[in-house]
Amino acid sequence: MRGPLPLHLQISEMLIREIGAGRLADGARLPPEREMAASLGIAVGTLRRALAELTGKGLLDRIHGSGNYVRSRGDLLGIYAFFRLERVGGGGLPTAEVLSVERLPKPSDLPEFGSTREGHRIRRLRRLDGEPAAVEEIWLDASRAEWLAREDLSESLYLHYRLALGFSIVRAEDRIAVAPTPDWGPPDFKPPPGTLVGFIERIAWAGDGASVEYSRSWFDPGVARYVTRFR
C-alpha cells in the first residue's frame, strides 16, 4: 500500500479509536447508514466498506432490519494499535505527513538497536483529526531495507513494514517524559523550538525477536494525551 490510507480504512480507524476512547459505547446503535455517510461527507458505499472492516474485527454487529451495533472489546486491533496519542477529549483519526527520509549513521545519543551502524531516519508531523499534534523521528535499522522512498511510505509505517518490507512489529516499549521540542519541526507544530512538551521514546521489536526500530516523539499537551488502556 502506498500513500495515504484508502478512505474506507481511514473511517474504520476513526471508529475504532472512538470505540477505544469510550465515545462509542458497547451496545450503542450507529446512525442509519445514509445519515452517517452524509455527516462524514462520504459515499454510502465507502461507509459500508468501513463498517465491514469493523464487522470483520468483531467490533460491530450488523443486524438486518435493525441497524449496526457497537461491540466493545479490550483488544482493538486497528492499523494504529501501537499509536498511543489521542485528542485531549479522546479518540481522533491519526494522519502523518513525511517531512524527510534519509539513510544516515546512527547518532551516538540513540540507544542500541538493530544490527547495523546505519539507519533510515524518518521525520514526520502527526495530526489528530487534522490538527498538528506531534513531531516524530523514527530510526529503522538499515538491515531491514536498503532504501526507503518518501513517496512509498503509507500513513502507518508498521503497515508498510508488513506489506512492503516483509516483517511485522509485534512488541514495543515506551518511555514517557518531557523534553524540549526540536529545531526541525514545521511551522504547523505550534510549540516553538525549546518548549517543554510531552516526550515518548520507543524501542520496537520484529516477529523474529530483533530490535529493529527506535523512535522519539514530541507531542503538544494542548492537543494530545498519551493513552494506554487495560480491560
Image (cartoon, rainbow, N blue to C red):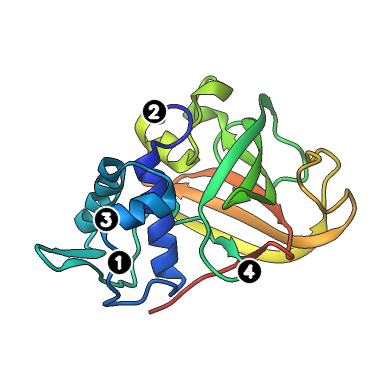
Spatial distance from mark 4 to mark 3, Cα to Cα? 28 Å
Task: From the image, state whether disc 2 or disc 3 is nearer to you.
Answer: 3
Residue at (44, 62) in percent of width and height: 17
Q: Amino acid at mark 4?
A: Val
Q: Which circle marks residue 164 in the picture?
A: 2
Q: Earlier in the sequence, mark 4 or mark 2?
A: 4
Q: Earlier in the sequence, mark 4 or mark 3?
A: 3
Q: Horizontally, is 88 left or right of 29 in the view?
A: right
Query: Does the CB distance between marks 4 and 2 fall below 8 Å?
Result: no
Up-down relation of residue 230 to residue 49 (above or below)? below
Secondary structure at badge 4 equals loop
Query: Does the CB distance between marks 3 and 1 fall below 8 Å?
Result: no
Query: Does the CB distance between marks 2 and 3 fall below 8 Å?
Result: no
**Nearer to me, 118 or 151:** 151
Q: Amino acid at mark 1?
A: Leu
On the image, the x and y values in percent for residue 84 come to 54, 61
Q: Earlier in the sequence, mark 1 or mark 4?
A: 1
Q: Earlier in the sequence, mark 2 or mark 3?
A: 3
On the image, the x and y values in percent for residue 109 come to 77, 45
Q: How many residues crowd mark 1 within 10 Å: few (<14), some (14–19), many (20+)?
A: some
**Nearer to me, 217 or 112:** 217
Secondary structure at badge 2 equals helix
Q: Earlier in the sequence, mark 1 or mark 2?
A: 1
Q: How many residues crowd mark 3 within 10 Å: few (<14), some (14–19), many (20+)?
A: some
Where does label 4 land, which residue?
88
